Amino acid sequence: MTNGGYEPVEILLVEDNPLDADLALRGLKNEKLANKITWVKDGQQALDYIFRRGEYAGRDDSGPRLILLDLKMPRVDGLTALRQIRADPAFSMLPIVILTSSKEQRDIVESYDLGVNSYIVKPVDFEGFMNAVAELGLYWMLLNQAPSCDP
């Protein structure tokens, strides 16, 4: 344990665009919202990370307390990843926020049908994007009260 007896806080960022990932990482780090921010580049890596498979099979931490998930990614898209994560009862209460450029109504509806906690369309300007991610982190990591999620 760290942080004066508290479990380390981890955020999983699932984003294929390196520029968006960099801005998100900067926004989260500027606010010191997590001890660890893990960035994976597609839905397949996210699933491997969450379910401790492949290169993440030996991961011994408790896992993320928040997932920021893009939709439009190679290999496995965000909706498919969301569907698989929510299908496992161990992750039914893990906060998942869609952070995407898609404003398509069908993506929004399907995301909520699959159990996403929030759907955010990425702001187009750099500063707006960093600020949006920082505000997301503040809300989900500090203000929101969630039940413990120990897979």
Image (cartoon, rainbow, N blue to C red):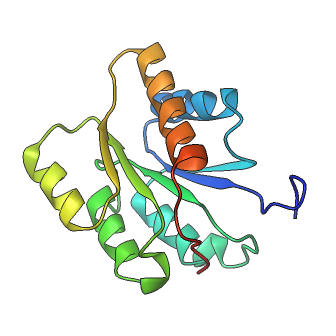
What residue lies at 49% left-to-right and 63% top-to-bottom?
Answer: 46
What residue lies at 9% left-to-right and 52% top-to-bottom?
Answer: 106
Residue 40 seen anywhere in this rendered image of the structure: no
What residue lies at 74% left-to-right and 70% top-to-bottom?
Answer: 61
What residue lies at 44% left-to-right and 28% top-to-bottom?
Answer: 132
72 left or right of 20? left
Q: In this view, does 12 lie above or below 81?
A: above
101 left or right of 141? left
Percent x, y of residue 137 = 54, 40
In which image quadrant can residue 148 be found?
bottom right
Quadrant of the image containing the N terminus: bottom right
61 left or right of 128? right
Percent x, y of residue 94 = 48, 67
Percent x, y of residue 34 = 69, 46
Residue 118 seen anywhere in this rendered image of the structure: yes
Percent x, y of residue 43 = 41, 60
What is the residue that sits farthest to the bottom in this orientation?
89
Q: Nearer the viewer, residue 58 or 121?
A: 121
61 left or right of 129? right
In which image quadrant can residue 15 be found?
top left
Quadrant of the image containing the C terminus: bottom right
Q: How many labels does the image show?
A: 0
Q: Nearer the viewer, residue 105 or 79?
A: 105
